[in-house]
Image (cartoon, rainbow, N blue to C red):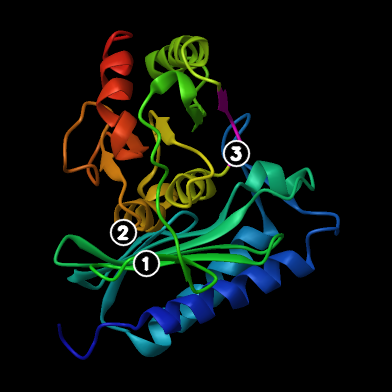
């Protein structure tokens, strides 16, 4: 690996500092913009992103960046940062404390570092490829659940309320709820996946997701011993159209089989 690769400690520091910035403004009145009728952005999304971009550009000016608010920023394609400066903006705008900062680093198309920080609970999930997954420095692992009926799952819904994927997501929600202990909708895909990585939840599935929502947390699930695939079971999940399953191994195939029934 070249000397231009960042360290996990660097990324953890940046995520926590961005999180502190966002947390400090949590109770304030927010300036809310609308990307669509239900997809919002606040001034804190932009402040967090500005801080993270400054750190990357200051330390690795040659790297490419993909971030939610600014889109794709040019650089050397073999080095790619994938950032969600505030995942769970709708929650944040309503002062619901379920949101996170998500930063991933990818080298030659392979995720290498992932950090998701939850400022409300001061929980920092992190992973480096081949070195395991951690929560506040303590190793974590996915659940050992073997039966779908014993699982608690989590999902999300597309922002486009008129899309085929939205109506399929509703069908999936109803079906999977009927054969498990329940399906939660928390509003932060990054935290959803981290809760799977730490064994709090058994699996996550979602259609029409964005790469910045899932990149860091997907690596964390993998390093925690979980299986990460696209909604059709394909290994290469970091490609359009983005969809994801992140699951404990013991129930992955059962979940995939049930999802396929709703095609």
Q: Position of residue 176 (x, y in %)?
A: 45, 16
Sooner in the amino-acid sequence: mark 3 or mark 2: 3
Residue 136, picture quadrant: bottom right
Callout 3 touching callout 2 (CB < 8 Å): no
Report the Cα–Cα distance between label 3 and label 2: 23 Å
Q: Secondary structure at mark 2?
A: helix
Q: Quadrant of residue 113?
A: bottom left
Q: Which residue is mark 1?
A: 127
Q: For the N terminus, which image quadrant? A: bottom left
Query: Which element is circle 3 on?
Result: loop
Q: Residue 188: x and y, percent?
A: 56, 44
Q: Could you classify mark 2 by the number of other residues whose Cα lies within 10 Å: few (under 14), some (14-19), or many (20 or more)?
A: many
| Of residues 210 and 194, the one drawn nearer to the viewer in this rendering | 194
Segment colored magenta: 182-187
Left or right side of 123 for 80: left
Residue 94 vertical placement versus 119 (above, below): above
Q: Secondary structure under badge 1?
A: strand
* Residue indicated by mark 3: 187
The residue under the point 51% across, 43% down is: 192
Could you give the CA–CA distance between mark 1 and mark 2, rounded to whole angstroms?
A: 7 Å
Residue 85 counted in the magenta span: no
Q: Residue at x 27, y 76 (%)?
A: 63
Q: Earlier in the sequence, mark 1 or mark 2?
A: 1
The residue carrying mark 2 is: 223
């Amino acid at each position: 690996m070249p000397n231009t690769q960042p360290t996990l400690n660097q990324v953890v520091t940046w995520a926590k500092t961005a999180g502190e910035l966002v947390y400090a403004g949590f109770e304030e009145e927010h300036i809310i913009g609308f990307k669509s009728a239900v997809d919002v952005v606040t001034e804190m999304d932009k402040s967090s992103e500005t801080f993270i971009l400054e750190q990357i550009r200051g330390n690795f000016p040659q790297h490419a960046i993909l971030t939610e608010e600014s889109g794709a920023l040019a650089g050397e394609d073999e080095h790619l940062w994938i950032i969600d400066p505030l995942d769970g903006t709708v929650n944040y705008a309503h002062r619901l404390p379920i949101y996170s900062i998500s930063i991933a680093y990818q080298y030659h198309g392979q995720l290498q570092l992932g950090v998701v920080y939850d400022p409300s609970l001061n929980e920092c999930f992190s992973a480096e490829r081949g070195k395991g997954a951690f929560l506040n420095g303590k190793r974590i692992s996915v659940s050992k659940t073997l039966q779908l009926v014993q699982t608690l799952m989590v999902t999300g819904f597309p922002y486009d309320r008129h899309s085929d994927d939205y109506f399929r997501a509703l069908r999936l929600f109803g079906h999977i709820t009927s054969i498990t202990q329940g399906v939660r909708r928390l509003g932060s895909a990054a935290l959803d996946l981290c809760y799977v990585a730490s064994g709090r939840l058994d699996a996550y599935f979602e259609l029409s997701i964005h790469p910045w929502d899932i990149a860091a947390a997907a690596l964390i699930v993998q390093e925690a011993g979980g299986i990460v695939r696209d909604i059709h079971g394909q290994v290469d999940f970091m490609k359009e159209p983005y969809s994801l399953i992140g699951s404990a191994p013991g129930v992955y195939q059962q979940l995939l089989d049930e999802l396929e029934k709703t095609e």
